[in-house]
Image (cartoon, rainbow, N blue to C red):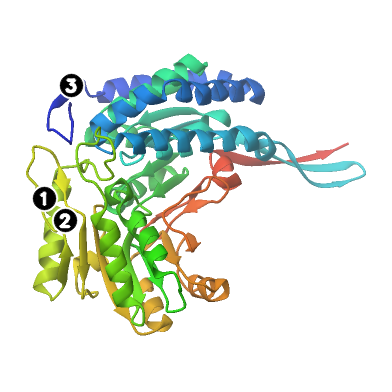
Amino acid sequence: MDILNPATGALIATLPDTTTEQAQQKYDTACTAQPAWAAKPLSERLQAIDKFYHLLADHADKLAEVTTSEVGKPLGQSKGEINGARKRIKFFLDQSARYLADEVAYEEEGLKEIIRYEPLGVIGNISAWNYPYLVGVNVFIPALIAGNAVLYKPSEHATLTGLKIRDLLFEAGVPQEVFQVVVGAREAGEALLNLPLDGYYFTGSFRTGQYIYERVAPKMVPCQLELGGKDPLYVPNDVKDVNNVAVNAAEGAFYNNGQSCCAVERIYVHEGIYDEFVEAFVKETQSYKLGQPTEEGVFLGALTRKDQLTVLEGQVKDAEAKGAKLLLGGHRIDNGGYFFEPTVLTNVNHTMKVMTEESFGPIIGIQKVANDEEAIALMQDTEYGLTASVYSDSQERGEGILKQINTGTAYWNCCDRVSPYLPWSGRKHSGIGATLSHIGIRAFTKPKGYHLRG
């Protein structure tokens, strides 16, 4: 497998794929080692993860360079991702003992009823490339803490990062047999699907997630899917500081080049403030520096995948053909890497792909609406259900709108953020199951009820 730098097209490394036979061996090794890992006191497992937490800080600069080289995001954003991952790990370190402890559900004289949370066994983690640290720690950290062994397949676009994660986990004290890395693309993923794992955790596209769900359904084991989104943002007419909202909305749309499942992908603005918002939004977007991700001050680096350039060009052409107005960008940059101009389209509607199909890039459509009812109808007009945002000077109005939107996450006066204290989950084509929060700790366990009489 060749690993290319998306900012230059240069070959970084060539790695051998994990074969089907090797995947089976890794599974057998993990199965043998997992009971001993689960038998360790929780405090010992937490100690290893705490060491990993500190090692990430010790090596942050070098780790960020590796991620930027294969993913294309600006170096500062790679460092920010590692710091964000450490905050999530700290949450798991602080909260896992509480939520993995025995629960006394009922007690009377001579009878005690207890819930205990046992590890699933050996789980498969098929991870993503856009946030390899943040997405990864949502799964393998609580899985390891709970006593599971993990077969971890980093995305083929973030494999070097995945191998760095492996090395630091081993250095931290996680047994090598307990954390097994599977390297490769589709074939490596198929190898995992063919194994009798005790749970599957995938982050990626809806189509791949649906395929995985169908493939593993006969095994009747947990299967969690964190999939895509077409996340809407609405600005009603009660907003006084329109410029500030536009600045926040632009960052939500273009941070990490829009390559985030919770990035703002479509914007609806009340007609009373529409022109003012669009002007401020375009001005803010024009201030973003696009260039080599290692350059100082760059906000927009390279797209990670070359084929996404064609997707974005297609959405622009489709929108213009149907009457959209291109205010900014709209083209790839021919400089040897996978760069696309930050793109703003107005006069858009839901006949256009840019407003209905996932973009996963630096492109946004801004649509004018007459009232809240029209905005709600348009926000709901999607197969996805990950996040939705409302910027309003009234919390009552904002929450009232968000309650009517079928998403796993709702934002009032913010967007494109994730908190470890809250469950991260999707509805409809955005996925099934949840990571983070206490739900994401127990997602890697199976509860057992004990009836203790005596």
In the image, residue 49 above or below residue 403: above
- Image quadrant where one finds the C terminus: top right
Q: Mark 2: give few (<14), some (14-19) or many (20+) Cα within 10 Å.
A: many
Residue drawn at (35%, 85%) of the image: 370
Residue 180 visible (yes or no): no
Residue at the location (36% across, 32% down)?
195
Picture quarter containing residue 279?
bottom left
The residue carrying mark 3 is 14
SS label for mark 3: strand
Residue 332 shows which numbered tag? 1
Q: Is residue 171 above or below residue 345?
A: above
- Could you tell me residue 432's position as x and y percent? 44, 53
Residue type beneath disc 1: Arg
What residue is disc 2 on?
312
Of discs 2 and 1, which sits in the foreground?
1
Q: Secondary structure at mark 1?
A: strand
- Residue 89 at what x, y percent from top left? 53, 34
Query: Which three-letter amino acid code belongs to the residue tagged 2?
Result: Leu
SS type, badge 2: helix
Looking at the image, which residue is at 30% across and 27% down?
65
| Sooner in the amino-acid sequence: mark 1 or mark 3 | 3
- Crowding around mark 3 (Cα neighbors within 10 Å: few <14, some 14 to 19, many 20+) is few
Quadrant containing the N terminus in the rendered view: top left
Who's the residue at 38% across and 54% down the image?
A: 262
